Image: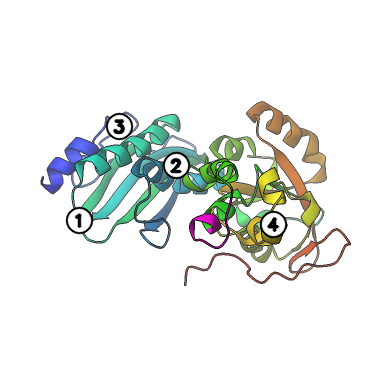
Amino acid sequence: MSEFDLIKRHFTRASPGAVLGVGDDCALLQVREGHVLAVSSDMLVSGTHFFPDADPYQLGHKTLAVNLSDLAAMGATPRWATLALSLSDADEDWLERFSAGFFALAQQHGVDLVGGDTTRGPLNLCVTIMGEVPVAQALRREGAQVGDDVWVSGKLGDAALALAHMQGKLVLSEQDYAACAPALHSPQPRVALGLALRGIAHSAIDVSDGLVADLGHILERSAVRAELSLAGLPVSGVLRGHTAQLVSCALAGGDDYELCFTAAIRQRVSIADIATRLALPLTRIGRIVAGSGCVVHDADGQPIQLQNGGYEHF
């Protein structure tokens, strides 16, 4: 099967949101009036970001999900994506399931695949995602203010706990692994939350490398300090039952793809309304104060010393 047959068979779909989609040297895209383009790229590498025998449908979903999470953190509406793949061989069954997972999530969020590339090589997956956000309404990392609440969506740490099990670092029961595994293999990008936080949140970021590490980017860009409470972190009953892993998974595990954001105290009612409307838990986990860095207090009010600050790419 040639490269063009592979693209035509597995990755060519109608792209009504583009002036011109797959099939030419470039896609042609038109941003709506009064909006700016939000663009991000993420690469997933076999053996680094996923196991070589990962389920291809779940991998297709996650490949797009981690990019959609970046748009969510900016409060952007997803519109278009490109996909570049290097493949050791053109396995028809693998490609069919991978593309099915990718396009199922793309359809859910109104994303058109408008281009990309394929080549022979070790399995690598790279998406460039594009979305729109009204001028001056993008959520950014630099807006946190002293007095803000610190919030996080969903639950933290289940993906890291499932990964530790898969790596043989600990043993979960079959039931506990089944409860945690979806967070790792099929993360749900919080796009609707990002849109709802426009005009409410002062700053936002998606949690991909661990809560403390990613919140740290907000703190650095905003020149402020965060004080968090370990007891206040939203974690599952499974993780809370594994006390030895709770701190590392919840604070530094990564792969959560939840949104962490800051907002003024006066926005608490609005944020509670958003949580109800989206049927998504939003938990207030701390506050922004003057200073720098992030401190997490245990149940006795003592600062926790983290052995690992989060995922490091190098």
Say left or right for 112 vs 218. Answer: left
Mark 3, mark 1: which one is toward the viewer? 1
Mark 3 or mark 2: whose residue is earlier in sequence: 3
| SS type, badge 2 | strand
Specify the label residue 60 is tagged with: none
- Using the image as rendered, state which of residue 193 and residue 176 is in the foreground: 176
Residue bounds of the magenta highlight: 164-172
- Residue on which disc 4 sits: 246
Residues at discs 2 and 1 in contact (Cβ within 8 Å): no
Q: Position of residue 179 (x, y in %)?
A: 58, 41
Q: Position of residue 72 (x, y in %)?
A: 54, 43
- Using the image as rendered, state which of residue 277 and residue 236 is in the foreground: 236
| SS type, badge 4 | helix
In space, the residues marked 4 and 3 are separated at their CA atoms by 44 Å
Residue at the (88%, 62%) spot, across then down: 301
In space, the residues marked 2 and 1 are separated at their CA atoms by 26 Å
| SS type, badge 3 | loop
- Residue on which disc 3 sits: 15
Q: Position of residue 300 (x, y in %)?
A: 89, 62
Residues at discs 2 and 4 in contact (Cβ within 8 Å): no
